[in-house]
Image (cartoon, rainbow, N blue to C red):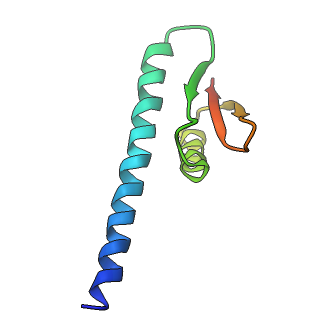
Amino acid sequence: MAVILPFLVALVLVEATKKYKDNLIAEVNEAISQGINTTSPISVGVSKYNPAVVNEVISLLTKSGWDVTGINIDGIGSYSTIILS
């Protein structure tokens, strides 16, 4: 039982992190859908997300051909907005 418990805790954390990242990806996809036929850059609020998760999503966007032209950082060093073009 002592070995299984840390494994289960780790599994729960991995699933929670995946869901968290999936939520951010869904928000980005929604923002892209709304801004796809406009001339203005696409802005996505990310202040409620962990910076490590935001970095992962920025990396995915860049690999997919998006130009992340701006990253706004709030006063405590967390991301507040990413801007895509």
The answer to whether residue 75 is left or right of residue 38 is right
Q: Nearer the viewer, residue 4 or 57?
A: 4
Q: In which quarter of the image is residue 10?
A: bottom left
The answer to whether residue 83 is left or right of residue 30 is right
Q: Where is residue 36 in the image (x, y as percent from the top left)?
A: 49, 15
The residue shown at (57%, 45%) is 54
Q: Residue furthest bottom?
A: 2
Q: Position of residue 78 (x, y in %)?
A: 67, 43
The answer to whether residue 20 is left or right of residue 60 is left
The residue shown at (45%, 39%) is 24
Q: Quadrant of residue 23?
A: top left
Q: Quadrant of the N terminus?
A: bottom left
Q: Which of 65 and 27 is in front in this view?
A: 27
| Relative height, residue 19 to residue 81 (above, below) | below
The residue shown at (72%, 36%) is 73
Q: Residue furthest left?
A: 1
| Relative height, residue 44 to residue 40 (above, below) | below
Q: Residue furthest front?
A: 76
| Relative height, residue 72 to residue 77 (above, below) | above
Q: Position of residue 40 (x, y in %)?
A: 62, 11
Q: Position of residue 16 (x, y in %)?
A: 36, 56
